[in-house]
Image: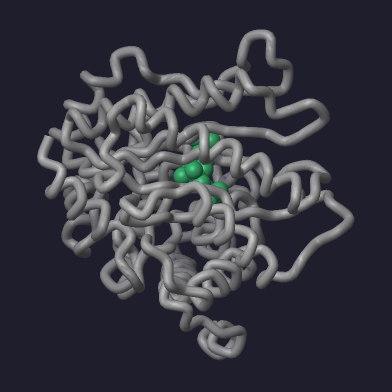
Amino acid sequence: MDLAALNKVATAMTQPGKGLLAADESSGTIKKRFDAIGVESTEENRRDYREFLFRTEPAMKDRISGVILFDETIRQKAADGTPLVKVIEAAGSIPGIKVDKGAKPLAFCPGETITEGLDGLRDRLIEYRELGAKFCKWRAVIDIGAGIPSHDAINANAHALARYAALCQEQQLVPIVEPEVLMDGDHTIDRCEGVTMWTLKTVFMELYYAKVQLEGMVLKPNMVLPGKKCATQVSDEEIAETTVRVLKDCVPASVPGIAFLSGGQDDVEATARLDAMNRIGGFPWHLSFSYGRALQHAPQVAWSGKADNVAAAQAAFSHRAEMNGLATLGEWTADIEKKAA
Ligand SMILES: O=P(O)(O)OC[C@H]1O[C@](O)(COP(=O)(O)O)[C@@H](O)[C@@H]1O
């Protein structure tokens, strides 16, 4: 393993001013997104949609450090025959790949899941590296509810994340380690804080046991939020302060960068909260984004499957990428948001 090379990629992925585009929706998830805009989820529609995102200027060049792809997409060619991986590289962005096989029910733990995909992973990583991937992603899902999460769910998922991350580094690929504590439910921000802390502490312990080199990875956590159905919602500043407190307590300084997932937050809220954290500043790691919905919701609605709408959809994507890019610098404001819209 060449740790300096892994560190270079991880640092580039989370460089100030830029962040990751999570375009790795699995077949079921992209169908849900397309259903919402009345578009049939065919291979061609998925290709056309992702191709116009990857060809969006200036967003890709200026604000998107890397793109997480799904297995289908890393093998696809643009309409003119250029591999989509090359389209991403031509924009100066880094291609990566989601390698987990999804969250499946965890035995004897009702309502909880374990992310699968470790069997045969080494061989798949070798193939993805040959297809051009420089980094990988694996998402573990932790739900909060009555009596959950359980010790078993957190431990099993943390262990799987560590085994995945070690295999990635062995194969000279940067692992994005994503333990997502969901924001569904009616729990308070305090409960999310406790569960996120428990999860992150367990994940970093397992990463240590698995000999994962923290300089060569990226963490993709949730922000610490009250559940969507919680009666007590809080300010963006409180979310930022709580999230920063948890990260400082749990994430070693040798991790080069942290790229948040959006998790179902409103687009502008996801930007405002990232900005609020970067305004606090003074961290050992760069705080960036790896958004799926918060970057793609606006372009999906603008596109709605019509070729005539592609320019408007690209403008919507550029806008969100620009706003989130500013948020990584603590330079976003509600005024800029409105003026630039
Ligand atoms: O389709 P899956 O595997 O459930 O993935 C869901 C999505 O969750 C993410 O990890 C985070 O996305 P969001 O920012 O929309 O929460 C994406 O990378 C991924 O596309």
Q: Nearer the viewer, residue 5 or 36?
A: 5
On the rendered image, what quadrant is the N terminus found in? Answer: top left
Q: Nearer the viewer, residue 56 or 228?
A: 228
Q: Is residue 204 above or below residue 298?
A: above
Residue 83 x/y as whole percent: 19, 46
Asked whether residue 106 appears in the rendered view, the answer is yes
> Which residue does the image show at 89% across and 55% down from the upper left?
231
Q: Is residue 138 left or right of residue 184?
A: left
**Image color mode:** one colour
Q: Is residue 9 above or below residue 320?
A: above
> Which residue does the image show at 54% across and 23% down from the upper left?
155
> Which residue does the image show at 75% across and 45% down from the upper left?
191
* Total numbered circles: 0
Q: Outermost residue, front direction?
A: 249
On the rendered image, what quadrant is the C terminus found in? Answer: bottom right
Residue 195 x/y as whole percent: 66, 40
Residue 7 x/y as whole percent: 20, 51
Dividing the picture into quarters, in which one does residue 98 lie? top left
Dividing the picture into quarters, in which one does residue 104 lie? top right
Residue 218 x/y as whole percent: 35, 48
> Which residue does the image show at 36% across and 54% down from the upper left?
253
